[in-house]
Amino acid sequence: MKKTTVLGFGNPVREDDGVGVYVVQRLQEALGDQPGVQIIDMGTSAFEVLFQLKGQDRLIVVDSVKNVDEPVGTLYKVPEEEILRHVQVQDHIYTHSLKWDQALYYARQMLGEAYPPQVDVYLIAIRSTRFNTEMTEEARQGAERLVEILTEELKKA
């Protein structure tokens, strides 16, 4: 059985920034205890990701992306290679300020062959990260589209 981990990132008190957390919460509702699927609400953590990946066959990362020219709620599927090409590598790792893209880079280095061979990164376009516990309707619609896509994929896995 293929083992998949889904990580949702974001801050749910910063309006649309919480979209990744929203997606994983909805996936947990939709899938329940799906065999072989591990769904993790990462919030704003990143370092913990390193040890969650060992031996997984597939990793799905969900987060928001700001400052894009497309409408709020637009979905992007970005190749891992593209993400890693832009990582800012640091000589000293401060775990409290580590971003998830940096965590992936370090995980790949640390885990070697135990790193998941398939990594899918989904980003949802947002504009607002102001203090607010409610997402905009456009961001929620984008999140719901992704929940549908991933629920379908993961039920088949």
Image (spheres, rainbow, N blue to C red):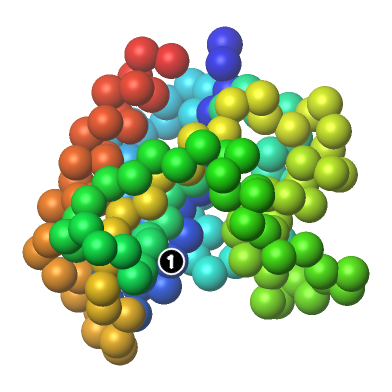
Identified by mark 1, the residue type is: Gly
Work out which quarter of the rendered image holds the N terminus and state it. top right
The residue located at (67%, 59%) in the rendering is: 87
Q: Secondary structure at mark 1?
A: loop
Tell me the quarter of the picture where residue 59 sits.
top right
Position of residue 15 in the picture relative to residue 82 (left or right): left
The residue located at (38%, 24%) in the rendering is: 154
The residue located at (29%, 86%) in the rendering is: 130
Position of residue 92 in the picture relative to residue 141 (left or right): right
Q: Position of residue 50 (x, y in %)?
A: 73, 49
Q: Position of residue 101 (x, y in %)?
A: 62, 56
The residue located at (42%, 31%) in the rendering is: 33
Residue 94 visible (yes or no): yes
Pick whichever, 33 or 41, lies toward us.
41
Tell me the quarter of the picture where residue 4 sits.
top right
Q: Position of residue 97 (x, y in %)?
A: 68, 76
* Number of on-image labels: 1
Position of residue 6 in the picture relative to residue 123 (left or right): right
Pick whichever, 53 or 68, lies toward us.
68
Work out which quarter of the rendered image holds the C terminus and state it. top left
Position of residue 59 in the picture relative to residue 73 (left or right): right
Q: Badge 1: how crowded within 10 Å, few (<14), some, or many (20+)?
A: many
**Outermost residue toward the bottom?**
131
Q: Position of residue 111 (x, y in %)?
A: 83, 38
Residue 48 visible (yes or no): no
**Outermost residue toward the left?**
137
Q: Is residue 97 above or below residue 140?
A: below
Pick whichever, 115 or 51, lies toward us.
115
Q: Is residue 77 above or below residue 21?
A: above
Q: Where does label 1 land, which residue?
A: 10
